Image: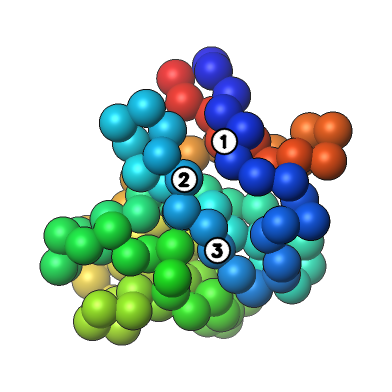
């Protein structure tokens, strides 16, 4: 696994996301209010636009989520699955804090 530095932890406030280009893959990295880190694909599968990082972070029945700003589909940050249409999913990536930075892993 190769880890890519995305930003400092201080640059990623709770309940926000940032976009990251990891080679040819675009990721959306989120920090939740409970200091959880999640990384999913940044491209909305319904519109094809790279906008997931600008989505609204929330919670559905204890599941951390992000709502796409395009069509408001809600995705699980843990699994990438669309909670409105379970046959559609975003890719997910391992993410971690390391030495004050946020890193995303690619295999």
- Rendered-image quadrant of the C terminus: top left
Q: Badge 1, how many Cα within 10 Å: few under 14, some, many 20+?
A: many
Residue at position x 65%, y 45% in the image: 7
The residue tagged 3 is 17
Q: Which mark is residue 20?
A: 2
Q: Give neighbour class at mark 2: few <14, some 14-19, many 20+ (Cα, 10 Å).
A: many
Residue 104 badge: 1
Residue farthest toward the right in the current orientation of the protein: 99
Residue 105 is situated, as x and y percent measured from the top left of the image, at 54, 29
Q: Nearer the viewer, residue 29 or 73?
A: 29
Across and down, in percent, residue 104 comes to: 57, 35
- The alpha-carbon separation of the residues under discs 2 and 1 comes to 9 Å
Of residues 100 and 63, which is closer to you in this image? 100
Residue 67's label in the rendered image is none
Answer few, some or many: residues within 10 Å of disc 3's Cα (few below 14, many 20 plus, some between 14 and 19): many
The residue depicted at 23 percent of the width and 82 percent of the height is 71
Q: For the residues labelled 2 and 1, say whether their Cβ atoms are less than 8 Å apart.
A: yes
Secondary element type, mark 2 = strand
Q: Secondary structure at mark 1?
A: strand
Q: Are marks 3 and 1 in contact (CB under 8 Å)?
A: no
- Residue 87 visible in the snapshot: no
Q: Which of the two labelled residues, at mark 3 and mark 1, occupies the earlier sequence position?
A: 3
């Amino acid at each position: 696994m190769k880890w890519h530095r995305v930003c400092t932890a201080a640059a990623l406030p709770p309940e926000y996301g940032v976009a990251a280009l990891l080679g040819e893959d675009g990721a959306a990295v989120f920090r939740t209010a409970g200091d959880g880190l999640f990384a999913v694909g940044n491209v909305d599968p319904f519109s094809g636009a790279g906008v997931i990082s600008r989505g609204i972070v929330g919670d559905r029945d204890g599941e951390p989520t992000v709502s796409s700003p395009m069509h408001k589909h809600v995705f699980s940050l843990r699994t990438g699955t669309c909670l409105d249409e379970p046959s559609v999913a975003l890719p997910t990536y391992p993410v971690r804090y390391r030495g004050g930075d946020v890193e995303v892993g690619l295999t």
